[in-house]
Amino acid sequence: MRYRQRFTAWTPTRAVKQIRALLKQYERVLPLTEENVHEILRGAVLETQDTFSAAGVSMNNLRLMWQVENVLRDASLSTAPEPEAAPVALRGDLPDRETLAQLEREVSAVVSSDESFGLNDIVLMVLEAIFRGGRFDRVLFCLVTRDRKQLEARMGLGDDLESFIEKFRFPLSLLSGPVGPALIQQREVFVDDVGTSRYNQSHFAAVAGASAFGMLPLIVGENAIGCLYFDRRSGVLGLDDSMKQSLLNLRGYACDAIASKKTGGG
């Protein structure tokens, strides 16, 4: 089923009810706006992380922040935008090597922990790490259709996402721009500048409307079952070798999660 809304694999019903009850109970003596609640909870996450770090205990900031946002959003208290409405990266807003590496380490810590996570959880964390660390405009999780004739976007983060997912469908052919090299030849595709690339006049470039993009095939077993797509609507891709390696590592976590799901391990 194509992704049309945020993930619901983690539903913090009890936390939502508790927040609403507290706000109702103390609204006269301690009036709080939605923004106040949001900042208090986010600040608590950061302070808790510092405390645990000082004690030598590892705590995953990315995972906990995501859980807080889910509570706030389900309680209609979140001031953060939905993933589909995330801001577009500004021209020249290139990836941050340290942020990307840190987010990749956090995802690695999550997937290697003893805690059990659903496939949606892991895919969302991978997409978020790529989106935030790469400072891309759009990031997509795409799958090949069952008849292996077409590549379709299923979920993602970024600007104008609903319409982009709707039109991001391409035949699985060597003539379909970068889809062939990525899915049929199973090669990573990094296009730093579409305007000077072999794909400049392609149908793919016209549909995507990106100035730079990348496609990482999701290979499970010996088959490419989909890809991760990320782009910029202006400017260059701006990835060095270490950034590309972080992205490849993140792609690997998604592949492992999918493989585990297929074999009944997740």
Image (tube, rainbow, N blue to C red):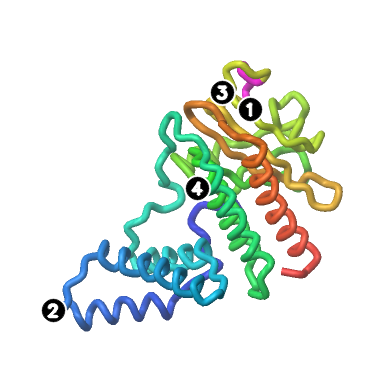
* Disc ID at residue 182: none
Q: Earlier in the sequence, mark 4 or mark 2?
A: 2
Residue under numbered circle 4: 132
Name above or below for residue 226 compared with residue 20: above
**Discs 1, 2 touching: Cβ within 8 Å:** no
Secondary structure at badge 3 equals helix
Viewer-nearest of labels 3 and 2? 2
Give the Cα distance between marks 1 and 2. 56 Å
Range of the magenta residues? 199-203
Spatial separation of the CA atoms under disc 3 and disc 2: 56 Å
Q: Is residue 205 visible?
A: yes
- Give the residue at x 59% y 22%: 194
Q: Confirm or deny contact between disc 1 and disc 4 (CB under 8 A).
A: no
The crowding category of the residue bearing disc 3, from other C-alpha atoms within 10 Å (few below 14, some 14 to 19, many at least 20), is: few
Which residue lies under the disc numbered 1? 191
The answer to the question of whether label 4 and label 2 lie on touching residues, with beta carbons closer than 8 A, is: no
Q: Earlier in the sequence, mark 1 or mark 2?
A: 2
Could you tell me the amino acid type at mark 3? Ala
Q: Residues within 10 Å of mark 2 (few under 14, many from 20)?
A: few
Q: Indicate the quadrant containing the C terminus: top left, top right, bottom left or bottom right.
A: bottom right
**Amino acid marked by disc 4:** Arg
Please name the residue that numbered disc 3 is placed on. 206
The residue mark sitting in front, 1 or 2, is: 1
Say above or below: 42 vs 226: below
Amino acid carrying label 1: it is Val
* Sequence order check, earlier mark of 1 and 4: 4
